[in-house]
Amino acid sequence: MSVIEARGLWKEYDRDVVLEDIHLNVAAGDFVTVVGASGCGKSTFLRMLLGEETPTRGELLLDGRPMPEEPGPDRGVVFQKYSVFPHLTALGNVLLAEELEQAAITARLLGRARREALVRAHEMLERVGLGSAAKKYPSQLSGGMQQRLAIAQALMKNPRILLLDEPFGALDPGIRKDMHALILELWERLEITVFMVTHDLKEGFDLGTRMLVFDKTRVDPHAPNAYGATITYDIPLQHGARSTDRLPATMLEGLPSNHDEESN
Amino acid sequence: MRRLINQRPGRVLGAVLALLPFALVVLAYMTASTARLAENPGDKLLPSLISMADALVRLATEPSRRTGEILLWADTAASLARLMTGVAISMVLALIVGTATGLIPYLRRSLSPFLAALAMIPPLSILPILFITFGVGELSKVVLIIFGILPFMIRDLQQRVEEIPGEQFVKAQTLGGSTWQILLRVAIPQTLPRLFDATRLALGAAWLFLIAAEAIAAENGLGYRIFLVRRYLDMQTILPYVAWITLLAFVLDWLLRRLNYWFFPWYPTGRAK
């Protein structure tokens, strides 16, 4: 069964159409990457998956049920920035997931429950390579380490889908490569569904098992917002296969391809 | 020759420059005082530093003939008790109301305009009302301080909560946090150091309202004392008292800054760099 299903989904703000007629089925275990020019509604779509926005028309289903109208633990998220809590150490950030789940009133754990949660939190930090930085605050971590922490934190809840909103966009190319390896490893090992928005076409090809391209099919030059974007290409991918050449040249024009020249 | 904006004083010169205005003021005072006293040794307007020191020692060591208390300490204790009570109550209320209104749109909608209107009322103008309602005792002074600083502290903290990136609240929800848990573990902890900052700013106003209230109706306190002895042109007492109040204000400010540094290492002014 599909984890995510969209049926004739529209998103409009007053008379501005952002997304129109989106149909989509995402199977469990897919690594979906979403690319498109800026302003094409890919972030809006992600926010709908998060529950921050609701569709104007159509249906959006999570595991066959209507998407909840607010964020919840079934959907983990990593943003480009501000994804971790600055007032908690790395360990505290990961531990928070357990504390929120187990202590409804105090949101803090004591005694044995805390010790057990600490073990799981430490394991998760080790898994993303932050074992030695457990006591550090986010401001003491590099950008890449902060994103590792954000991923660890999101995975603590075993979410049905992991939503990534340009998570590596602010990182240096070298660090970004490490992060790609990490996210692929976690995706394979934990068998989760990943939905990743990126403006980096190469990243989309390298990471995804399936790439969605959001674009406008109709443009009225006198009313730029009269028509919304939809999914114009839905490309199945195999990991490791470079396939930029399989796309029509007209489509590539609208996309930033600044990382395409980089050699592997 | 580098531009003036690129030139920085060294350590020693920097310290000298910092002390210079103080030294100049003391020097100017001493010159004027000496000149006046040379003309009229009984002059009360600009007492000599030595006579002020004598007065201060007397105030700080000798019990008053009327009450048997040592005036400086009794006044300090009374004033600080009022100030601290007012400020402490304001801090607690500001934290609770400020974070709650910052986080919960329904509360914000209903309380924000009201608080904005409340903050517009000049606090001293309601002092008569406070005296009538709460009497001229301690309560009216504490309430005046709270009324004077609380509305703006609440608005400050509310804005701090609104400044927390929305991503964090989304993230907290994806970790399963309820509104209460998010208030407790995300909004309040991140607002606490801001509370100390807001309190530092509010202290100046708190002192103002304290001294105003004491000047109008009190039986002791630092503000009461300086307004009492004003009738006798007792500059010997007033000037050391003003210096003492300034020192107290400085120490409180310093203490609040240190608290931020000790308690919140993640905060930009904190230790974790």
Image (spheres, coloured by chain):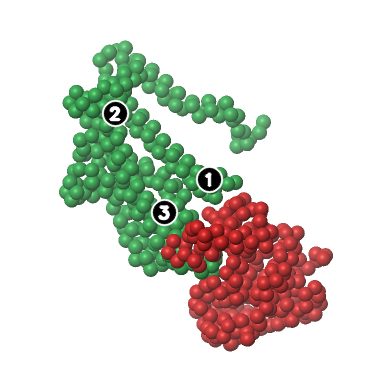
Chain colours: A red, B green
Quarter in which the C terminus of chain A is drawn: bottom right
Is tag 1's residue or tag 3's residue first in the polypeptide sequence?
A: 3
Pointer 2 chain: B
Residue visible at 60% across and 29% down in the picture: B10
Examine the rendering and report whether any part of residue A32 can be seen.
no
Tell me the chain of label 1. B
**In the rendered image of this protein, does residue B99 appear above or below residue A66?**
above
Image spot of residue B1 (x, y percent) = 67, 31
Q: Find disc 1 in the rendering and name its residue.
A: B269
Question: Crowding at label 2, few (<14), some or many (≥20) Cα neighbours within 10 Å?
Answer: many
Q: Mark yes or no: residue A57 visible.
A: yes
Residue at image point 66% right, 33% down: B2
Q: Distance between the residues labelled 3 and 2?
A: 35 Å
Amino acid type at image mark 1? Thr
Quadrant the N terminus of chain A occupies: bottom right
Other-residue count near label 3 (Cα within 10 Å), few / some / many at <14 / 14–19 / ≥20: many
Residue for badge 3: B156
Crowding at dot 1, Cα within 10 Å, few <14 / some 14-19 / many 20+, comes out as some
Q: In this view, does A89 lie to the left or right of B202?
A: right
- Asked if both marks, 3 and 2, belong to the same chain, the answer given is yes
**For numbered disc 2, what is the local secondary structure?**
helix
In the rendered image, residue A95, in percent from the top left (x then y), is placed at: 55, 60
Three-letter amino acid code of the residue under disc 2: Leu
The mark found on residue A131 in the picture is none
For label 2, the residue is: B72
Residue type at mark 3: give it: Asp
> Considering only order in the chain, which callout, 1 or 2, is on the residue closer to the N terminus?
2
